[in-house]
Amino acid sequence: MRSYEYKNTARNKKVDAQVAGEELERIRIRDGNLKSDVVLKEAKPAKALLHPAFEWDNKKAGNEFRLIQSRTLIRSVRVVTEEANKPAFIHVTVKNQEEKNDSYYQDPEIIIKNVDEFAHAMREAVSKMDAATEAVKDLETFASKDKDSDRMTMIAIAIKSLETASNALGRAN
């Protein structure tokens, strides 16, 4: 049996991580993947295991917010092994038979074995690396006015490292 916990930055811990992980995995096995709208639908009955993880008061939150809560819950669950603490599910977007984007979460072990899902997951990783690089470059713009050489050196190293990682991931894809 897998052992689950929430990542350190998880905000919503109203459902025990082990319970959440097992319930999300049950849904993933049943459907072949995890979609935020399906998780939300499964959580809707008051007796559902994931029900407490959502804001059901429509005066406080609407369906779109609950979909955000669903995606956040899925991304927050981690699998704990002796070697590491790793995501239980990874987001991928693939083209379906109608050539439309189909977004869902998948077990990393399955993604590694599926060429298409792995390629899409790598492209998403490169996109995130590029976004992080742009964020650090924006920071560099503001920090350059400060004339702190240590800070500028640190930022330059970060930018170079992010660009190197992004290039390496892009070549692996």
Image: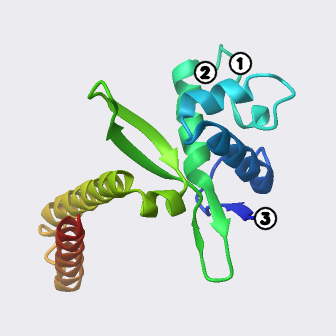
The residue that label 1 is drawn on is 57
Q: Tags 2 and 1 in contact by the CB under 8 Å rule?
A: yes
Residue 141 vs 24, above or below: the answer is: below
Badge 2: residue crowd in 10 Å (few <14, some 14–19, many ≥20): few
**In the picture, residue 113 is in which quadrant?**
bottom left
Q: Give me the disc on residue 61.
A: 2
Q: Secondary structure at mark 1?
A: loop
Q: Residue 65 falls in which quadrant of the image?
A: top right
Residue under the image location 64 percent in, 28 percent down: 40
Q: Is residue 121 left or right of residue 147?
A: right
* Sequence order check, earlier mark of 2 and 3: 3
Q: CA distance from mark 2 to mark 1?
A: 6 Å
63 to the left or right of 58: left
Q: Is residue 98 above or below residue 113?
A: above
In the displayed structure, 147 sits above or below 62; it is below
Residue 49 can be seen in this image: yes
Please tell me which of labels 1 and 3 falls first in the chain.
3
Q: Is residue 13 visible?
A: no
Q: Disc 2 residue type?
A: Ala
Q: Residue furthest right?
A: 47
> Residue 16 at x, y = what percent?
80, 51
Q: Which residue in the protein does label 3 denote?
A: 1
Q: Helix, strand or loop at disc 2?
A: loop
In front of the other: 21 or 17? 21
Between the residue at mark 1 and the residue at mark 3, the CA separation in whole angstroms equals 35 Å
Image point (30%, 56%), residue name: 119
Give the CA separation, mark 2 to mark 3. Answer: 35 Å
What is the three-letter code of the residue carrying label 3? Met
Say how the picture is coloured: rainbow
